[in-house]
Structure formats: C-alpha cells, structure tokens
Image: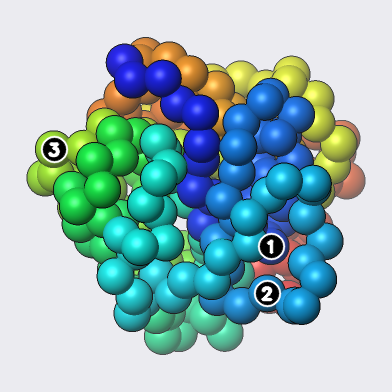
Amino acid sequence: MAEIKKIAIFGAKGATGRQAVQQAVARGYRVRALELSWPENPDLPEGVEAVTANVLEDDLAPATEGCDAILSCIGLPFTARTALNPPPLYTESARRYVAAMKDTGIDRLVVISASFVETLDRGPLLFRVAARAALSPIFDQMGEMEQILRQSTVRWTAVRPGWLMEGELTQDYTITPNVIAPDLIRTRHSDLAHFMLDCLETEIYDRRTPAIARSEDRAAESARSLAAEIAH
C-alpha cells in the first residue's frame, strides 16, 4: 500500500468535509480542500490549499495532481425538493474521480454512499415510509455510483452511513458490512469523517461498502425528528 501524505478532499465546505479537513490536518496529512467556490479568505486550518473544482463538469486531474488519495465528502441534501430531480452528482463525480486517478496515478479513493442504498429497513416506520417516498432517486444514484466504482480498477471504499447528524467526534461508532446494525439509525458527520480517514490507512475496506452508525439519544432517533429532517 502506497504511503499517503497528501489528500484531496472534495466537498470541503460541507458538514462532513469540514470535519475531514480538520481531522486530516490533526493527523499530520497535507490537505487540498476542493469546492465549487471559495471566498477570498477561506476559513481553513493553516497550510490547507483552497482549490476550486466542479465535479459535474471539470477534468479533475489538474485539481488533484500531486495528491496521494481522494476523499469525497460531496453530497446532495436529503430533501424532498432535491429528490424530485437530483443532479447526477454521485455518478458523474465517480466517473471523473476514476478518470483523474488514471491520469495522475492516485491510488486511493473514499466516497460517501448510504446504508439506505441496500435497505431502508432501519429506524422508525414513519421514517422508512418518508425516505422511500421522497429519497429513492438519490439512493438509486448512490447505488449507480457504487457500480461505477466496482467496474473500475481503482482502490475505492464507499462508506455507508445512516441518517447524518451534527455532533462532536466520539469515535464510539459501530462498523458493519454493507448495512448499519438493525438497532441503529444515526451517524455523526464527525465520526463519518474519522472513519473515512481510517479507511485510507488500511487495506481492510478496499473495494468494500462498510456501514457506520452509533446509538444516539431518543430525541435524535425519534420518528418525528427523522421525518422532519427529510421534509425540511
């Protein structure tokens, strides 16, 4: 396994991306933070490069040249509005990551998928019904993204979290093959970022779809809370 010193992190301004940038720097990695746009003075840790890139349109080789791995923290908001006609963010970015890796020699890719690609049989019944009705096109696209990666020759991992939420890093999460454990539903952005970085440091999850979740308080896991977040 090639040593990873510098990581290109896409979606660096998002909830998971911000955590990934901070945690990667804390682990001693050099980081290139990639977004569609940046303000003149981006709020990033010292030494982090702020680079613009459009994963739907750009050749990503120039944006990732000199990096050893790609961490993709991009994502569509899981809302009914987005689900009506989601842009091909996951599928198109996967194709462009694979092409860029071929051109630059980058050896490692970790992306965010979802446990719900495999099953929605997790969490309260109201959540399952709402998610199935509103978000199936997004989950279907994530499944297509995974298929694109399976057909490639790159070393990839598609991490499958549960329903994402804010919260401090715990490192107290459960990893299971493919689908989150039956009694879990939530995943913290901070824990997701932590595990994605862990995936870069081992070959255990190469070309696999590990799922990550943890037990949270009742309010966060309630049917009302989960359904309200879908409808937001």
Position of 115 relative to 211 (above/below)? below
Q: Which residue is drawn at 60% across and 44% down?
A: 31
Q: Residue at x 49, y 48 (%)?
A: 8
Give the left or right position of residue 30, taking residue 158 as reference. right
Whether residues under marks 2 and 1 lie with C-beta atoms below 8 angstroms apart, the answer is yes
Mark 2, mark 1: which one is toward the viewer? 2
State the SS at label 2.
loop
Q: What residue type is labelled 3?
A: Thr
- Near mark 2 (Cα within 10 A), the count class, few <14, some 14-19 or many ≥20, is some
Give residue 20's quadrant in the image.
Answer: top right
For the C terminus, the quadrant is bottom right
Q: Distance between the residues labelled 3 and 2?
A: 32 Å
Q: Distance between the residues labelled 1 and 3?
A: 29 Å
State the SS at label 1.
loop
Along the polypeptide, which appears first: circle 2 or circle 1? 1
- Near mark 1 (Cα within 10 A), the count class, few <14, some 14-19 or many ≥20, is many
Along the polypeptide, which appears first: circle 3 or circle 2? 2
Q: Position of residue 30 (x, y in %)?
A: 60, 37
State the SS at label 3.
loop
Residue to which mark 2 is pinned = 38
Q: Residue at x 73, y 21 (%)?
A: 171
Give residue 69's quadrant in the image.
Answer: top left
Give the left or right position of residue 163, taking residue 91 as reference. right
Per the rendering, the mark at residue 72 is none
Residue to which mark 3 is pinned = 153
Whether residues under marks 1 and 3 lie with C-beta atoms below 8 angstroms apart, the answer is no
Q: Distance between the residues labelled 2 and 1?
A: 9 Å
Per the rendering, the mark at residue 13 is 1
